[in-house]
Amino acid sequence: MKELTLNKQHNKLKVWCFKMTNQLKIFRAKHNLTQAELAKKVNVRRETIVFLEKNKYNPSLRLAYDLAHVFSVTIEELFIFENK
């Protein structure tokens, strides 16, 4: 994780940069689910699943929890955080 510090009038703001990837497509395939079926289970559009699988969208904590619950895994098993 890379730490950036911004200094504006002696107030410091620290920002941590990281890249998040996921194992969503792998778990979906293991459970024989289509993108549409998975989307229905977690109450999102199929396009949301597409963007998640392409790592073009980071889910809300609630969505991450719901997705992990569908596959009976932890959020950490489904989503991988890497230093950027």
Image: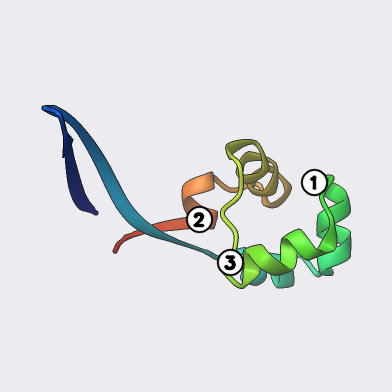
Image location of residue 82, percent across then percent down: 33, 61
Residue identified by numbered label 2: 79
- Rendered image coloring scheme: rainbow
Residue at (24, 54) in percent of width and height: 1
CA distance separating discs 3 and 2:
13 Å
Q: Circle 3 — which element?
A: loop
Residue at (61, 49) in percent of width and height: 59
Q: Circle 1 — which element?
A: loop
Q: Earlier in the sequence, mark 1 or mark 2?
A: 1
Q: Earlier in the sequence, mark 3 or mark 2?
A: 3
Amino acid at circle 1 = Val
Left or right of 63 on screen, residue 11: left
Residue at (34, 56) in percent of width and height: 18
Residue identified by numbered label 1: 42
Amino acid at circle 3 = Lys
Residue identified by numbered label 3: 56
| Neighbour tally class for label 1: few under 14, some 14-19, many 20 plus, Cα within 10 Å | some
Q: Are marks 3 and 2 in contact (CB under 8 Å)?
A: no
Amino acid at circle 2 = Phe
Q: Are marks 3 and 1 in contact (CB under 8 Å)?
A: no
Label ID, residue 65: none
CA distance separating discs 3 and 1:
18 Å
Mark nearer the viewer, 3 or 2: 3
CA distance separating discs 1 and 2:
16 Å
Image location of residue 66, percent across then percent down: 70, 41
Front residue of 25 and 57: 57
| Neighbour tally class for label 2: few under 14, some 14-19, many 20 plus, Cα within 10 Å | some
